[in-house]
Image (cartoon, rainbow, N blue to C red):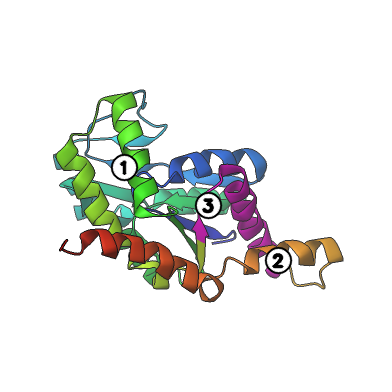
Amino acid sequence: MSGILYIISAPSGSGKSTLVTEIRKVVPDLEFSVSYTTRSKRGSEQNGREYYFISRAEFERMIGTDDFLEHADVFGNYYGTAQRFLHEAAKRGKDLLLDIDVQGEKQVKNRVPDSVSVFVLPPSRQVLELRLRRRSEAEGADSEAVIQRRLHEAAKEIENYPNYDYILVNDQLELSIDQLKAIVVGERLKRIGRPLAPEEQTIVDRARANLRENMRDKAESVLKTFQMSAAPQR
């Protein structure tokens, strides 16, 4: 592959989709891979924009013909990334961004070890619950049981943060966009094979602040808010 493959993952409701939308506006030559899914459309979603919505039978046919770079069963629905997006981006000399879950990240890292993975965290369980409830009210999509299931699943997903290269806590949207941009551009700069100009080194240093080893304490602090909520009350 001639470009860089970026992976972004996050628990449902962490603001990942908004970050992906915004980063595509401010970073050139970054293509986005639209995933396939068997789940139903939500709200104003459109086929081919948020996802390619297909039947379970069609998805399983694609699994059988090895069409997917990665795929997973999440909440009873399939999600997957078609391999063709990598080949098409490579032909155009573009970088590719994948919006996938923790199961998919492991599969892609096995196939493309030099890919760059970013895990987006909510500031806390309380903030995530508020975001999920607001989304549910706006879309009329999720029941109380679904919200609680997503919070429980988020705790398990966050435990996978050590598998990622970068950690980003999405507290303030504009700051998070700037941090994600620094990561994407910084990885490009690290691979250009020449000494960096001072302003370029500043971008790389800004990205380095979000490396997993530099964000471990913050990630553990967020994870603890989920573990405390799950603990039995006295």
Asked which secondary structure carries label 1, the reply is: strand
Residue interval drawn in magenta: 168-191
Between the C-alphas of marks 3 and 2, the distance is 19 Å
Q: Establish if 158 lies above or below 150.
A: below
Q: Residue furthest right?
A: 197
Q: Earlier in the sequence, mark 2 or mark 1?
A: 1
Residue 229 on image: x %, y %: 25, 58
Q: Is residue 142 magenta?
A: no
Whole-number angstrom distance, CA of label 1 to CA of label 3: 16 Å
Residue 34, quarter of picture: top left
Give whichever of 81, 138 is nearer the camera: 138
The residue located at (27%, 41%) in the rendering is 37
Considering the image in quadrants, where does the N terminus appear? bottom right
The image position of residue 180, as x and y in percent, is 59, 53
Q: Residues within 10 Å of mark 1 (few under 14, many from 20)?
A: many
Q: Please say if the residues under marks 2 and 1 sit with CB atoms less than 8 Å apart.
A: no
Q: Which residue is mark 1?
A: 36
Upstream in sequence: badge 1 or badge 3: 1
> Is 224 in front, or is 60?
224
Q: Can I make out residue 65 in this image? A: no
Looking at the rendered structure, the kind of residue marked 2 is Val
Category of crowding for the residue at label 3, using alpha-carbon neighbours closer than 10 angstroms: few (below 14), some (14–19), many (at least 20): many
What residue sits 67% from the left and 62% below the top?
Answer: 186
Q: Secondary structure at mark 2?
A: helix
- Which residue bears the numbered disc 3? 96
Camera-near label (2 vs 1) is 2
- x and y, in percent, of residue 145 in the image: 15, 41
Residue drawn at 56 percent across, 73 percent down:
214
